[in-house]
Amino acid sequence: WAVLRGHSLAAPHRHMTNLRLRAPVAVGMVHGTAGSAAALALVPMTLYRPELGLTYVLVFSIGVMAGMMGFGVVFGQLQLLLGQHLPRILQGFRGAVGVAAIGLGLTWLQAG
C-alpha cells in the first residue's frame, strides 16, 4: 500500500528499528514451522521405530525453520540497504515483489 500511495518507508523510525529487524525472523519461524506439516506425512513410514520418525520430523522442522529465517533476514537486509542508499529502487523492488506474489497466487489458484 505504501508503494501505491507514494510513501517511502525507506527511512526507519527510531521506535520501529527493533521491530523491523525482528520481523523477518518471526516470519521465517512461522513459515518454517508451517512447512513442517508435510514432513508429518512421512512419519507413518517409520512406525517400526517411532523415535526415528520423531527425530526426522524434528530435524526437518529445524532445518526448514532455519532456512526460512535465513531467507527472511537476507531479504530484510536487502530492503534495508536499498532503503538507505536507493529509496526509489526500493519502491520499485517492493512493487515488483508484490506483483510477482499476486501473479504466483493467481497462477496457483488457476491451476488448483
Image: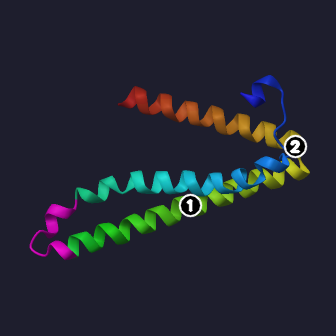
> Which quadrant, please, contains the N terminus?
top right
Could you tell me which secondary element the residue under label 2 belongs to? helix
Is residue 66 a member of the stretch shown in magenta?
no
Boundaries of the magenta span: 42-51
Which residue is the site of mark 1?
A: 69
Crowding at dot 2, Cα within 10 Å, few <14 / some 14-19 / many 20+, comes out as: some
Residue at image point 71% right, 51% down: 20
Q: Give the residue number, with chain letter if any, for mark 2.
A: 87
Residue depicted at 76% across the width and 30% down the height: 2
**Residue toward you, 30 or 89:** 30
Of the numbered discs 2 and 1, the one sitting upstream in the chain is 1
Relative to residue 63, is residue 69 drawn left or right? right
Density class for disc 1 (Cα within 10 Å; few <14, some 14-19, many ≥20) is: many
* Residue 46 percent location from the top left of the image: 15, 70
Image height check: is 101 above or below 4? below
Q: What type is the residue that disc 1 sits on?
A: Met
Q: Main secondary structure of the magenta part?
A: helix
The residue positioned farthest toward the top in the image shown: 5
Residue 58: image x %, image y %? 34, 69
